Image (tube, rainbow, N blue to C red):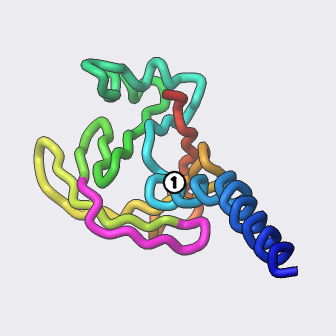
Amino acid sequence: MQRFHAMKLLTRLMVAPAFLGGFLPFAIADEPAVLDGSWASDVEQCSRVFVREGGRTGLSQDSDLFGGGFIIEDKRITGKMARCTIKQRKDDGNMVHLLAACATDIMYSSIQFSVKVRDKDSITRIFPGMDGVEINYQRCPR
C-alpha cells in the first residue's frame, strides 16, 4: 500500500512540472517584458518604420512618413524625437503606466506613458488628461 502511495506521489511530482511548464514560462516571460519590442502604428509598414543596423533595431530616417513607432528595450523607450529611461512602472490589470525621463535635442523632461495591453502583440497608447485620444500599435515581427 505504501508503495502505491509513493508511486502516486512520484507521478504527481513528475506530471505537475510538465503541466506547469507549458504555462509558467509564458506568464513569467510576459510579465516584465510584455512591452519589449518594436511597435508601429501599422504592422504592414514595419520594414519602412524600422531598420536593422549592426544587429540592433532603430527607427528609419523617414519612419514618421509611414505612421511612426517606437522601440522598448528593457528600461529604454526610443522614439523618433526622444530617448527615454523608464523610472517607474505600475501594472494595473491590462493597463501599464510608465514614468520616464526623456531627452530630446532641446531639453530633458519627464513623461507619463500609459498603454492598454490588448494582447501580446497589440497595445493602445493612452494620453492621460486627454480623453478619447488613443493610438493603436502592433508589435513588429523580429
The one of 52 and 99 positioned closer to us in this rendering: 52
Instruction: Give the residue number, with chain letter if any, for mark 1.
Output: 29
Q: Which residue lies furthest to the bottom in this view?
A: 2
**For residue 66, side relative to residue 111 (left or right):** right
Number of marks drawn: 1
47 inside magenta stretch: no
Give residue 2's position: percent from left, percent from top: 81, 80
Q: Is residue 132 visible?
A: yes
Q: Which corner quadrant of the image does residue 137 belong to? A: top right
Main secondary structure of the magenta stretch: strand
Residue drawn at x 57%, y 54% is: 25
Residue beneath the point at 39% across and 40% down: 70
Does residue 1 sit above or below 76 in this rendering? below
> Quick one: label 1, few (<14), some, or many (20+) residues within 10 Å?
few
Q: In this view, does 12 lie to the left or right of 118?
A: right
Q: Which amino acid does label 1 sit on?
A: Ala
Q: Quadrant of the N terminus?
A: bottom right
**135 w.r.t. 43: above or below:** below
Residue nearer the viewer, 36 or 39:
36
Span shown in magenta? 85-95
13 lies above or below 65: below
